[in-house]
Amino acid sequence: MRDITFRGDSGELPEPGGEADALLDACGRVAAWSPGAQRMLGHRAREVLGCSAADLLYNPADAADILQRRDPDGGCRPSPLVLRQRNGEPLEAEVWARPFISVTGERQWLVQAASTQAVRAYKLGRALLKGLFTDIPFHIDVFDTHLRFVAQNLAQRRAGVFRGTEYTGHTMREMAPPGLLDMDAFEARQRQVLETGQALIDTEVVGHVLPGTPPREYVWSESILPLKDPSGTVIALAHAVSDVTQRARSRERLALANEAATRIGSTLDLWCTARELADFAVRRFADICYVDLLDPLFQGEEPGSGPAPHPPLLRRAAWNGVPEDGEPKSSGAVAVGDLDTPAMAPDSPFVKALAKGESVLLTGEELLACSAAVDPRQGAPSAGPQIHSWLLVPMVAHGIPLGMAVFLRSRNPLRFEAADVRSAEEFVTRTAICVDNASRYNRERTTALTLQRSLLPQRLPSLSAVRTASRYLPASGHTGLGGDWFDVISLSGGRVALVVGDVVGHDLHSAVTMGRLRTAVRTLADLDLAPEELLTHLDDQMNRFLDERGDEGYKAVNATCLYAVYDPVSRRCVLARAGHPPPAVVSAEGSVDFVDLPGGPPLGLGGVVFEAREIKLGDGDLLVLYTDGLVESREQGLDIGLRRMREMLSRTPPSATPDEVCDALVRRLLPPHPQDDVAVLVARMNGLARDRHVTWRIEAEDELVGWARDLTLQQMARWGLEEESFTTELIVSELVTNAIRYGEEPITLRLIRDRNLICEVSDGSSTSPHVRRAQDTDEGGRGLYLITQLAQSWGTRYGERGKTIWAEQPLPG
C-alpha cells in the first residue's frame, strides 16, 4: 500500500489518499495493512490480517455506517470515527471507504484514515497555499536560481503587467515592459539573496506605469525570500510585491509639510515669506513657482476690511525657477514687485480660484490657453521644456484671501495629481498663516512707530543757549516700541532743561508710560523746580502709575531719568539723576569727563531723596546725555561701554556739530542689531554775552522804584528797543513795587535780551503772589493782572533763598 505525505510547518500532513490505508474483503475482514496504518494504530500487519475491521474501532457498531456513506455523485465522504490503538487508547480520525472490484471479480473496500489533527493541518496548508497563490492581493512570483519565472500568483496575472501568459522560463527583464523598473538594481537584489541566503524585506522600489499612458510614478514594497531545500541550499526565490504608493505619498507629504514648517515663515516680512515659499517649492515640488499677494497687504491695510476691487490687485511677491544650462530661468512677463496684470483679467483662472478659494489644476488645452494669456513666454519653444502641468493654490487665512501661489512643471515629466494638490495646499496654508502674521505685524509696527514718534519730540526747539541734536533707535527684532525718550524744554530766564529717560520694556505699556513720564516732566519743568525736586515729584508720579495698574504692571514699570538745567547767564548747569548712566562732558579743548553725579535709585521706589550737582560749562562745551542701550549690552558691561565712549568722544574734532557727534556715537558704539532701544541727546552750550543781560541790586525803599524805571529805560536805549520801553517800564515798576512791599531783601532786578526780552525781579521771600481782579474801589491789587495783559508769559520760580517773578515780552523780528 502507498504512504504519500506532504511535509509542512505542522509536521506530517496526509495526501488526499490519507496517511493510513487498509483493504477489507466483502465480509469486512482486513485483507491488507499499510505501514502508515501500523504507525497510526500500532498494530503490525500479521496481527490484524483476517481480523474484522470492527475490532479496530473503539465502538464496533460504527463499522456498518462507514460502508454506507456515499456522495450523491457516487463518491465517498469522510466519516469521523474513533479508532482503537494497540494500547487500547482511542484516536479520533477521519475515515474514507471506497468500494471497488478486484481482478478476480471479488467485491472489496479500500479504507483510508487520517487523524483529525492531521486533517486539520492539511486543510490549513491547502488554505494557505490557496490564499497565497489565488486570493491574496499581493503580487507573488517564484524564480529559479537563474532568475527565471517558475510560478506566479493570480494577482500578478490580473495586474496585466506582462505582455503574454507564457512567462515560465523567462526573466523579469525579458517580460517586463520598458521603464517599469531599474532592472540592473532588481537583479542585483535577487543575486544578493541567492548568494547570502538572507531575505530582503520591505524594500521600496520606484517604478513607472506602462507606455502609452500619462506619466505616473508608483512605489512598491518588495520582499525577496530565499527558498531552501532540506540541506539549506537556496533552490529558488519568492518575491512578494505590494503597491505602497499611497503610503509613500503620505509619508512624502508629511515630510514636505514638516520641512515647509521649518523653512517658511522665519521672519515677519511679507517679501521674505513669499520668497521662502518659492525657494522651498522649486526642485522639491515644482520647476517654477511664483507668489502673487493682494496689493493692500503691502500698503499696510487689513485684508477684507473694505470693498474688494474686482478684479483684485495682485502684486508679484516672489519668483523662482529651475536653472537651464547653468543660467537661471527668466522671471516671466511680470517682475517681482510689479502688479500681475495678466492674472488680474476678469476671466482668468487666477481670479476664479481666488474668488472660490479652491485650488485649480490645469492640463492639456486649458493649460495652453491659460499660459498663453497669462505669460506668452512660458510656452515658447525657446524657453526650454514645455510646461505640461499648472497648479494654482489660493492663499487663504482665517477665511480671508491673501493671494495666490502658482506651481508649474516642465522638466519633471510627472503631472500634478490629487495628492500633489493636497501637499501644495498644506504648505500654502502654512505660508498664508505666516503672511497673515507678517501683515498683522507690519500694521501693528506701523501703528507702534506712529505712537512712538508722537510721544517723542517731533522737533527740538531752537534756542540761543544750546544747539542740540538727538537720535532714537528702536531695539532690533521688536515692534519699534520702547521706553527710551529725550526732551529739550525752554525755561524762564533763557534757561533750558535737557532730559533723557528710559522705561524698561519694548511693549505698548512701556511706550505709554514713557509718554506719561515725558508729559509729567514738562509739567513739572513749567513750575521751575530744581532738578532734584523734580525727580522727587516724578518718583511720586511713577508710584501713582504703579497703583493704577496694580501687580500686573509692576514688573513692566522700571524707569530711570537724568534731568539737567543750564543757565546761559551764569553758564552753570545743575544735574540730578535717578538710576541713569552719568552724562559726559566734552570740553571745547577736547577733554572728556563723566560728571561725578550721585546715581540715585530708579523711579518708582518712593521715599527717596535725590541729590543734585552743579558744574560750570564753557562756551562750545558738549553735554552728552544717553540711555544705557548705547553703552551696555549682554556682551558688554557698563564699564567697558563707558571706556569705549570716552575713547570715541576724545577723538571727536572740536568743530564737530551735535548731529555729527550723534552719528558717530551710534555708528561706532552700537552693534548692527542692538538688543535695546537707544536715545542720545547732544547739546553744545552757548552762554549769553555780557552785553545781553544786566542785573541791579534794589534797596527795599519805595523811592527806588523810580530809579529802577530809569535804569530800565537806559538799558532799553542801549539795546535799541525804545519802542518796547514803555511796556517794559510798566512791568518793572509793578514787579519791583511788589517785591518792596511784600517781599524781603535782597531784591534784584535783571533784564535779559535773548530771543525774547525777559524781566526778572528776585527777593528773599517765598510767599507766592496771586493774580486777582481788583474792585473799582480798590486802590491797589492790579499789578500782576496788568502784567498778564502786557507780557507774553510770566511766572514764579523758587530758589534756595526766596523767589523770582519773571515776565517775557516778544521782540520784533
Image: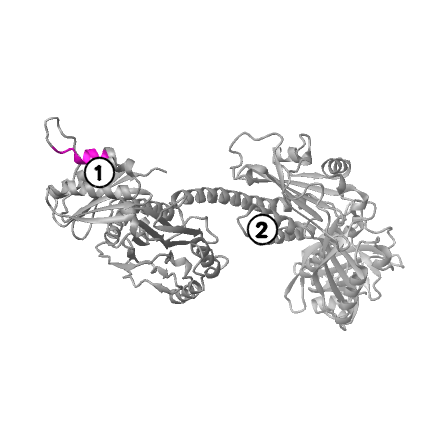
Say which label, 1 or 2, has the lower sequence index.
Answer: 2
Q: Which residues are magenta?
A: 780-788
Q: Residue pushed farthest right?
A: 103
In percent of the image, x 18 and y 36: which residue is there?
784
Task: Report the side of 41 relative to 261 (left or right).
Answer: right
Q: Main secondary structure of the magenta part?
A: helix
Task: Report the side of 240 relative to 615 (left or right).
Answer: right
Residue that numbered label 2 is attached to: 264
Residue 787 painted magenta? yes
Residue 781: horizontal and vertical position, in percent? 13, 34
**As shown in the figure, which amino acid type bears the numbered disc 2?**
Ile
Residue 493: horizontal and vertical position, in percent? 27, 46
> Residue 209 or 777: which is nearer the viewer?
777
Q: CA distance from mark 1 to mark 2?
A: 76 Å
Residue that numbered label 1 is attached to: 729
Residue 519 painted magenta? no
Q: Does 776 sit above or below residue 359?
A: above
Q: Nearer the viewer, mark 1 or mark 2?
A: 1
Q: Secondary structure at mark 2?
A: loop
